[in-house]
């Protein structure tokens, strides 16, 4: 556009220039003829003006050119700028494109890198696969090698087998040759065989003849045997008859013998009874004998005892005589014994009393002895005290003496002081001192008196103790005298008492030992029981915590047992239900055992199979009905199967309901061969039967003929 | 521990004996397998490694009994402590671990501590517990599930606290008894013995 505008400006300037040039030319031309003289001036002015105009035009054109050039420059600048901008745009676009391409390239690079990695991984995997495959290959090589080896072996085997086959073939050939030779032999043998057969036939005929004659001969032999048997029987019978005769002859003799034997029998029975009686008598006598013998023994014993007793009696009597106690009867003896016993009892009582008195005395003595000892000790103490006190008294007396001497001395000093000094200052002091001394003296005297009184008391006590001691000793001596006298008395008692006492002592000792042993045993038992954990309920009691592990464990056990019992019950009930219901497992219990999956599947299968069965049956029923109706309609016959392989056909056009044809299938099932059976209706169709079945042998034609016949009958009538 | 370094008081002796019972009962439960072995941890006591249960209920029960026992030891009213092991199936007593306690009552009146070194007491306790562990070799195996109970023989006139009740001595029918070592703190003397049911194979 700028160019166009530039062109238009250029054209416009050109036009203006041209117009200017033309104008001055015209003006020049016009003005020339008019002015002759001033023409030169005018021409000159005009030239000058034209020159100026031309200069102006030139300048103008140069201006225009410059402006054009400027415009062109501007244009070119603009163009350049535009172009630059375009270039910039384009370069920016290129840049962006490059950037995009860069990005894309980077993405591509990344993808390529990923692909590379994948390819590497794939490569690695492939390498691994390669390795695996190589290994497999190696294994396969090995296997192939093995197989090759095996093949080689098998080849060897095959070779061997081939060799064997060759050998066998050779053998076969040999055998075949043999066979052929043998065939020839066989033929020869067969000819021989034929010859032999003919001979055999002759021989068989002869044999048959022989057999027949043989049979005849056997029959005759049998007859002979029979006859011989009969003969033998008859001989036996004759023999028997003879024997019978002889026996008959013996009969009377036998009768006589029988009589005799009967008499003997009765006689023997009687004797038997007598025998038994005699046996009983003998047994009785034997028992008596035994008893008598026993009695004899007892008698002997009794006699011996009697002798002994007599001796004892005599001894007793002698005792009595020896003891001199006026004994004649045992009563006297018992009396004496009783008396002696009484005496003994009395003596024992006395002994016991004496023993008890002795013991009491001894106890008293024992008690008194320590008292005596105490008293002696006390007496000794008192003596000591007295001695001490005597010594004290002596000391005191000495002190008194000393004090008196001191007093005297002090008095002397005082007197001396009094005599020497006349001042009255010391006299109160001296008086005081004197007073003090006197006080002291009085105290000492009082002390002395007390001591003396104590001493006197002690002496009195000692005296009393001495008296007591004397009394006790006197009592002791008296007791000792009594003891001695008692002892003397007791010595005079019987030695028997002493011995009896000794025996008692020994018994008591034995008892004591026994008791000691029992005591030991009981102590052992007690120790044992103590070890076992026994205790004396009077002194100890056993306690434990109520919530102890054993009771808790027992409770737990009981609860577990209860739970298990309940579970058991429930399971038993379920089992009973299952056995009774046969698959119904509806329970209200919380212990539902889910039926196994197999059972459910099988049940479903069963149900589906039953459904299928039913449906198939229905479908079959329907189909067969349809088919039968179709057959009936199309063929004109209703075909029923009455019995196995028997078919009854009833025609559509049958005149009576019972008119039917019976066919029976002969031959194997499915072969289709049928036979017509006789019925009332078929008798009426004999003509058709003859024609179609016997001559043409075609059942369909026959049936269609029958249909036509019946149809014609119906339509006509 | 209120025992002085130089001597044993009644209270200190009661604590020592209660401590011995606590560890001794744990050892018996572990050795005889009344509770599974994995419920026991090892602790060091008396210079040896002993087992202690970690079962909370059992621990609670044992602390109850032992604390009550400590009081009674201080009062010198307890005579025996017995660990009874019962078979759960037949409810028969299979083993009885009996500890006789003799208390010197003069220690109550006279409160001067007695001269006995704690080391010596611990040595004696150690030998007793070692012997308990060793008895497992000749005791018959406890093949059925068992539970244990702690019985305390006390004076008849003792007031039975709440949660405690009187029970029978739970003796073993046909038992063999073995006396074990004893130890003394000079205030309390503890004799141990074990009684077990005679097995028919013997």
Image (tube, rainbow, N blue to C red):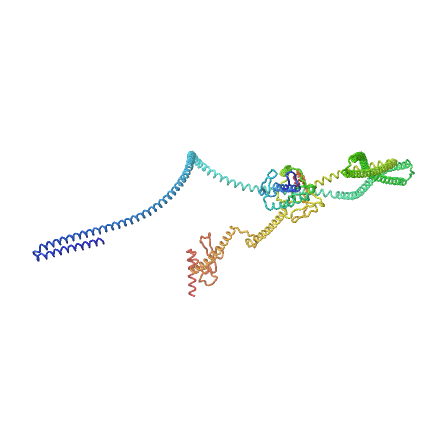
Q: Position of residue A709 (x, y in %)?
A: 42, 62
Q: Residue furthest right?
A: A326
- Residue found 51% across the figure and 40% down from its top: A206
Above-or-below relation of A566 to A242: below
Nearer the observer, B155 or A343:
B155
Viewport quadrant of the N terminus of chain B: top right
Q: Residue furthest left?
A: A36
Asked whether residue A303 appears in the rendered view, the answer is no
Q: Residue furthest front?
A: A422
Nearer the observer, A690 or A310:
A310
Give the quarter of the image for residue B32. Answer: top right
Q: Position of residue A336 (x, y in %)?
A: 89, 40
Q: Position of residue A329 (x, y in %)?
A: 90, 40
Viewport quadrant of the C terminus of chain B: top right
Q: Position of residue A577 (x, y in %)?
A: 57, 53
Nearer the observer, A672 or B151:
B151
């Amino acid at each position: 556009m700028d160019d166009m505008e530039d062109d238009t400006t250029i054209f416009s300037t050109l036009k203006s220039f041209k117009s200017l040039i033309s104008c001055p030319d015209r003006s020049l031309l016009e003005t020339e003829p008019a002015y002759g003289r001033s023409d030169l001036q005018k021409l000159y002015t005009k030239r000058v003006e034209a020159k100026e105009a031309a200069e102006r035009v030139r300048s103008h054109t140069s201006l225009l050119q410059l402006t054009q050039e400027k415009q062109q420059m501007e244009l070119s600048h603009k163009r350049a700028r535009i172009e630059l901008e375009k270039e910039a745009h384009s370069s920016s676009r290129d840049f962006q494109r490059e950037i995009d391409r860069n990005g894309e390239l980077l993405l591509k690079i990344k993808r390529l890198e990923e692909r590379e990695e994948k390819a590497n991984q794939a490569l690695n995997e492939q390498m691994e696969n390669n390795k695996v495959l190589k290994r497999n290959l190696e294994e396969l090589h090995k296997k192939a090698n093995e197989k090759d080896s095996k093949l080689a072996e098998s080849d060897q085997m095959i070779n061997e087998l081939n060799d064997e086959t060759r050998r066998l073939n050779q053998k076969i050939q040999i055998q075949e040759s043999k066979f052929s030779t043998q065939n020839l032999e066989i033929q020869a043998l067969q000819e021989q065989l034929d010859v032999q057969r003919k001979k055999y036939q002759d021989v068989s005929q002869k044999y048959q003849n022989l057999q027949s004659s043989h049979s005849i001969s056997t029959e005759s032999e049998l007859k002979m045997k029979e006859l011989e048997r009969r003969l033998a029987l008859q001989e036996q019978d004759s023999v028997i008859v003879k024997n019978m005769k002889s026996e008959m002859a013996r009969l009377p003799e036998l009768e006589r013998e029988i009589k005799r034997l009967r008499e003997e029998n009765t006689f023997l029975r009687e004797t038997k009874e007598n025998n038994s009686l005699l046996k009983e008598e003998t047994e009785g006598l034997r028992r008596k004998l035994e008893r008598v013998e026993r009695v004899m023994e007892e008698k002997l014993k009794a006699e011996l005892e009697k002798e002994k007793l007599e001796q004892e009696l005599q001894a007793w009597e002698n005792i009595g005589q020896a003891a001199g106690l006026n004994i004649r009867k045992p009563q006297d003896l018992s009396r004496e014994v009783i008396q002696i016993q009484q005496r003994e009892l009395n003596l024992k009582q006395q002994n016991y009393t004496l023993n008890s008195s002795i013991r009491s005395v001894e106890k008293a003595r024992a008690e008194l002895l320590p008292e005596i000892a105490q008293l002696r000790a006390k007496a000794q103490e008192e003596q000591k005290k007295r001695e001490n006190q005597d010594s004290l008294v002596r000391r005191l007396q000495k002190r008194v003496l000393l004090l008196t001497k001191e007093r005297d001395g002090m008095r002397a000093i005082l007197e001396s002081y009094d005599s020497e000094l006349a001042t009255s200052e010391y006299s109160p002091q001296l008086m005081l001192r004197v007073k003090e001394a006197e006080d002291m003296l009085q105290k000492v005297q009082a002390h002395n008196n007390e001591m003396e009184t104590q001493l006197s008391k002690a002496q009195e006590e000692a005296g009393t103790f001495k008296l007591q001691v004397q009394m006790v000793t006197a009592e002791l001596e008296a007791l000792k005298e009594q003891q001695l006298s008692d002892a003397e008395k007791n010595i005079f008692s019987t030695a028997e008492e002493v011995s009896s006492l000794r025996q008692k002592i020994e018994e008591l000792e034995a008892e004591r030992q026994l008791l000691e042993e029992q005591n030991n045993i009981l102590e052992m038992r007690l120790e044992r029981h103590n070890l076992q954990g026994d205790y004396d309920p009077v002194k100890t009691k056993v306690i434990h915590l109520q919530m102890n592990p054993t009771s808790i464990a027992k409770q737990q056990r009981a609860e577990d047992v209860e739970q298990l019992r309940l579970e058991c019950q429930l399971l038993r009930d379920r089992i009973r239900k299952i056995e009774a219901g046969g698959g119904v497992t509806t329970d209200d219990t919380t212990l539902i055992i889910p039926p196994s999956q197999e059972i459910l599947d099988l049940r479903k299968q069963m149900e589906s199979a039953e459904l299928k069965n039913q449906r198939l049956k229905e479908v079959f029923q329907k189909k067969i009905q349809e088919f039968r109706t179709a057959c009936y309609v199309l063929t004109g016959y209703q075909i029923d199967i009455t019995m196995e392989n028997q078919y009854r056909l009833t025609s559509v056009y049958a005149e009576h309901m019972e008119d039917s044809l019976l066919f029976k299938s002969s031959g194997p099932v499915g072969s289709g061969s049928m036979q017509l059976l006789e019925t009332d209706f078929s008798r009426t169709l004999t003509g058709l039967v003859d024609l179609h079945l016997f001559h043409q042998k075609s059942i369909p034609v026959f049936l269609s003929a029958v249909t036509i016949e019946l149809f014609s009958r119906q339509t006509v009538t | 521990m209120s025992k002085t370094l130089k001597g044993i008081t009644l209270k200190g002796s009661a604590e020592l004996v209660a401590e011995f019972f606590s560890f001794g009962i744990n050892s018996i439960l572990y050795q005889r397998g009344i509770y599974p072995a994995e419920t026991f941890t090892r602790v060091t006591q008396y210079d040896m490694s002993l087992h202690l249960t970690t079962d909370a209920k059992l621990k609670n029960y044992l602390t109850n009994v032992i604390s009550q026992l400590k009081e009674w030891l201080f009062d010198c009213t307890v005579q025996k402590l017995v660990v009874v092991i019962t078979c759960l199936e037949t409810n028969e007593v299979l083993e009885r671990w009996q500890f006789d306690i003799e208390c010197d009552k003069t220690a109550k009146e006279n409160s001067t501590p007695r001269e006995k070194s704690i080391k010596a007491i611990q040595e004696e306790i150690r030998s007793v517990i070692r012997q308990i562990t060793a008895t497992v070799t000749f005791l018959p195996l406890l093949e059925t599930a068992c539970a244990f109970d702690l019985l305390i023989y006390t004076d008849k006139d003792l007031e039975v606290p709440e949660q405690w009740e009187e029970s029978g001595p739970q003796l073993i029918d046909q038992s063999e008894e073995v006396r074990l070592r004893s130890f003394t703190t000079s205030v309390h003397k503890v004799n141990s013995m074990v009684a077990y049911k005679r097995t028919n194979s013997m």
